[in-house]
Amino acid sequence: MISVEHVCRNFGNLNALRDVSFSVARGEIFGIVGHSGAGKSTLLRCLNGLERYGSGTIRVMGREVAGLGEEELRDLRRGMGMVFQNFGLMERKNVAENVAWPLDVWKVPRDAAERRVEELLDIVGLSSKRAGRIRNLSGGEKQRVGIARALALSPGILLCDEPTSALDPATTESILGLLGDINRNLGVTILLVTHQMEAVKRICDRVLLLDRGRVCGCGRTEDVFLSPSPEMKRFVRDDYASPEEGVCVRVAFPREVAGESVVSRMARDLAIDFCVVGGRLERYRDTVLGFLIISVRPEDLEGVAGYLSGKRLLWEVIDDVA
Amino acid sequence: MWRELASALADTLYMVSASTFFSVVFGFVTAVAMVLTRPGGLRPNAAAHTALDLVVNLLRSFPFVILMIAIIPLTRFLAGTSIGSTASIVPLTVAATPFVARIIEGSLLGVDPDVIEAARSFGARDLQVVFGVMVREATPSIILDIAIVAVNLVGYSAMAAALGGGGLGDLAIRYGYNRFQTDIMVYSIIVLIVVVQLIQRTGTLLSRKIR
Ligand SMILES: Nc1ncnc2c1ncn2[C@@H]1O[C@H](COP(=O)(O)OP(=O)(O)OP(=O)(O)O)[C@@H](O)[C@H]1O
Ligand SMILES: [Mg+2]
């Protein structure tokens, strides 16, 4: 659906994108993560031609973006909705008018447009607020309007630039849920730019890690998070606090395995001491994984490693104690 | 005296409304051009933008009295004469246009860039972005701009009296200052205060109403 090859973009002597390549398949939810200034927005905006790129090729739905004329570009954008961090809604229009805006631009007949707006408001759950003023909406409701607007022209692709970064955790969860539903029910391919790891784990099938304009990781979400590359570890360092002494081992358990009992059985079998440093449950789309971080004495590490591998559990030593 | 006051008020309103109208028309067009051509605008054009910017700054740095005298030939060409209320509309407009351009430019730039980006993201044309988004979103703020300009022009129109433009300022100067008829001066000033208040109130109310 989208294929990006060797794309570079410079602003003066700042390399915002350096040799970026990846591709997105139809129906996927594809995450793009990176720190502030990594070039995420620039990359996303290159995809629908809002930003030009210096070299490389970007093909979206079979068309090379850089080669499109003005009208062809409009046509491409018609097939790609975009959702913004700060919503980008017109304050002087009400909810329904904001959703209808792309339909106005494309001169969709009035009655067809009205029906479409009702459908969209229904999808995002805002039918009761159709005449509401934008400034009276909560952040989550505003983003729902933004999403409805992005879907107005029935695009095949939805580009989301930090859609949940201005929202609280509960609202974030509901917006991510909505994006997941849209992906499942309408078959819309979604690109999700974010710096929130939770958002990626929650809905992304695959994820691309961007660091100062360079791709430093790309793969299935589970793989990227469960056996992280050094870059990834650096990225999520503050997610896992480590204690002062001992060696910290992070063990991942599938949902049906109770982590504590495995670890305490191990302690009994190996006759060692350990202490639990932290633990949590994380959602990877539809599966829940448990993590347990334990601290063991350095001399016990070898035994622990052997035991955990014997149980076919994913584990790793967290060495870069932050 | 009342008759004089009434005709002076009519003169002031005539000069102020005409010059406000023309300066807003020209200033608005200039502002749109500046916003379009600025770096990062919809149609970036460094040469055009620099030129516009320079002209606007240049005209704004002229003291009004000097500008008024400097453009007498233009005034005569456009109005047929260089004295009187109608003639003073020319220098008033020339003086106010760059100011209008600057403040409307500010209002247009105040529009949330995400909204502009959103419009472009679903295929709006540049014209639709300028008028359907930028101007439309900035309208409440542009109305306030116009009120500011009109109030400034009330003050400038009094200076235009030096070129034989009529109006309340002229009345206050001729009778009150030159002939020591304090009552007429006080009355003209009271009327001026009321006019300014009305303009500002109307602008504020209108702007708030359509937000
Ligand atoms: N139009 C521009 N002109 C000059 N530099 C730019 C421009 N747009 C982006 N940049 C620079 O390119 C780099 C990448 O910017 P970008 O907005 O893509 O980052 P980001 O990953 O989206 O960051 P954030 O998480 O803060 O949104 C930044 O250093 C930014 O300053
Ligand atoms: Mg960004």
Image (spheres, grey):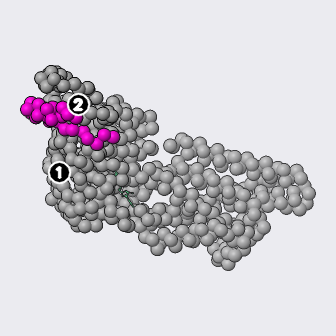
Task: Tell us which disc is closer to us: 1 or 2.
Answer: 2
Spot the residue most to the front. Answer: A299
Classify 10 Å Cα crowding around label 2: few (below 14), some (14-19), many (20 and above): many
- A173 vs B173, nearest the viewer: A173
Report if residue A226 lies within the magenta region: no
> Dot 2: what SS?
strand
B89 w.r.t. A305: above or below: below
Amino acid type indicated by mark 1: Val
* Residue at position x 23%, y 26% in the image: A274
* Residue at position x 63%, y 66% in the image: B60
Mark found first going from the N terminus, 1 or 2: 1
Is A141 displayed left or right of B107 in the figure? left
Classify 10 Å Cα crowding around label 1: few (below 14), some (14-19), many (20 and above): some
Spatial CA span between label 1 and label 2: 42 Å
Amino acid type indicated by mark 2: Val
- Chain letter of disc 2 in the image: A
| Relative image position of residue A255 (x, y in whole percent) | 15, 27
Asked if both marks, 1 and 2, belong to the same chain, the answer given is yes
Report if residue A310 lies within the magenta region: yes
For label 1, the residue is A24
Residue A72's disc number: none
* Residue at position x 27%, y 61% in the image: A18
Look at the image and give the residue range highlighted in magenta.
A298-322
Residue A296's disc number: 2
